[in-house]
């Protein structure tokens, strides 16, 4: 099978073709395995004929959406860039999964797609200029579980990212990040396939404010999931100090307990 180049999600098709030959497969990553564990724990498939609905926001090349669909969930991947969704459609065409679909849209319009049992928001929040509004929007459409993997801002500056001073925006503390060059054209924005969409500056919410934002969005249990790292003892300190990134879970416990 002839493929357009993939740059992020290493996927193996049923015929053995790989999107990124030589690269470790996304399905084997600690992040993918951990996210599937969260889904199985807080959003289990009780009736395979009527599986929970999952939305994958900013789904890029479709690798996580594919793994969730292979696990039996009804999955919608939402992604702003046509060029990324073209790759998602290749993934979709190569697999016989009627429970997997993709849509080109801005995550700001997530409210147009109905209700979901779980929302997977990985690598997107720190590309938005109104992240609090987005977490609130996810709270409004998600019945059980939010999986939020994101950078956040902390008081000691990250050595890796050039962020502004800590400042207030949307009623929370955080730092601004220049995501796209000033005056970027539509073509250039489309070509920056992992960056923000429609905003040149993104706002990274301060960690404690982020935790509280998840709770305010309606998730009464807020957890941090460390097993998305390959090696917690060795990697974790550098991730927190350098990357200032983690995986957070918001759970609506009433829905989960009632479902068990
Ligand atoms: C860093 S990548 C993360 C991709 C994927 N979720 C992952 O973890 O591998 C960010 C993705 O979000 C998409 N994106 C950025 N802003 C978006 C928006 N406002 N609406 C929808 N997608 C957006 C980008 O096109 C890109 O595919």
Image (spheres, rainbow, N blue to C red):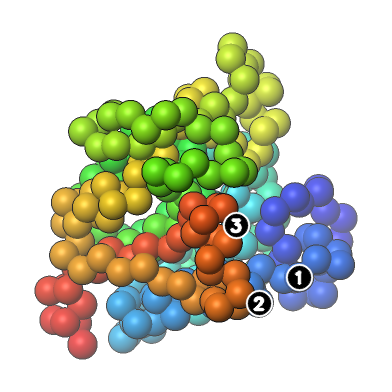
Report the disc number at residue 123: none
Tell me the residue at 26%/47% (across/down): 209
Tell me the residue at 37%/33% (across/down): 166
Residue 212: x and y, percent? 22, 52
Residue 97 visible at all: no
Residue 15: x and y, percent? 80, 74
Q: In this orientation, which residue lies closer to the viewer: 76 or 156? A: 156
In the displayed structure, 149 sits above or below 42; it is above
Mark 1 C-beta closer than 8 Å to ligand 1:
no
**Residue named by callout 3:** 62
Q: Quarter of the image for the N terminus: give it.
A: bottom right
Drawn side of residue 47 relative to residue 163, left or right: left
Residue 77: x and y, percent? 49, 54
**Residue named by callout 1:** 24
Q: Secondary structure at mark 3?
A: loop
Tell me the residue at 21%/87% (across/down): 260
Tell me the residue at 82%/74% (across/down): 16
Q: Residues within 10 Å of mark 1 (few under 14, many from 20)?
A: few
**Residue named by callout 2:** 28
Residue 228 visible at all: yes
Residue 229: x and y, percent? 56, 71
For the residues bearing labels 2 and 1, Cβ distance under 8 angstroms:
yes
Q: Residues within 10 Å of mark 2 (few under 14, many from 20)?
A: few
Measure the alpha-carbon separation of dots 3 and 1. Answer: 16 Å
Q: Residues within 10 Å of mark 3 (few under 14, many from 20)?
A: many
Q: In this orientation, which residue lies closer to the viewer: 67 or 233? A: 233
């Amino acid at each position: 099978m002839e493929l357009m180049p993939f740059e992020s999600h290493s996927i193996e098709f049923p015929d053995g073709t790989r999107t990124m030959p030589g690269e470790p497969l996304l399905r084997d990553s600690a992040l993918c395995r951990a996210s599937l564990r969260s889904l199985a724990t807080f959003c289990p498939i009780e009736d395979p004929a009527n599986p929970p609905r999952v939305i994958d926001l900013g789904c890029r090349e479709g690798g996580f959406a594919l793994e969730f669909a292979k696990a039996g969930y009804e999955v919608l991947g939402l992604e702003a860039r046509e060029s990324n969704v073209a790759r998602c459609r290749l993934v979709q065409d190569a697999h016989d999964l009627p429970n997997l679909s993709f849509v080109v849209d801005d995550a700001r319009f997530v409210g147009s797609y109905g209700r979901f049992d779980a929302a997977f928001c990985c690598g997107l929040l720190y590309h938005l200029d109104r992240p609090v509004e987005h977490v609130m929007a996810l709270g409004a459409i998600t019945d059980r579980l939010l999986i939020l993997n994101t950078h956040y801002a902390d008081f000691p500056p990250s050595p890796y990212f050039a962020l502004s001073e800590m400042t207030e925006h949307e009623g929370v503390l955080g730092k601004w990040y220049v995501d796209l060059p000033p005056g970027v054209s539509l073509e250039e924005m489309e070509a920056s396939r992992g960056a923000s969409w429609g905003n040149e500056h993104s706002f990274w919410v301060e960690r404690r404010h982020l935790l509280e934002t998840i709770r305010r969005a309606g998730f009464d249990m807020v957890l941090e999931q460390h097993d998305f790292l390959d090696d917690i003892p060795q990697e974790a300190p550098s991730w927190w100090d350098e990357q200032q990134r983690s995986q957070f879970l918001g759970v609506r416990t009433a829905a989960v307990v009632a479902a068990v």
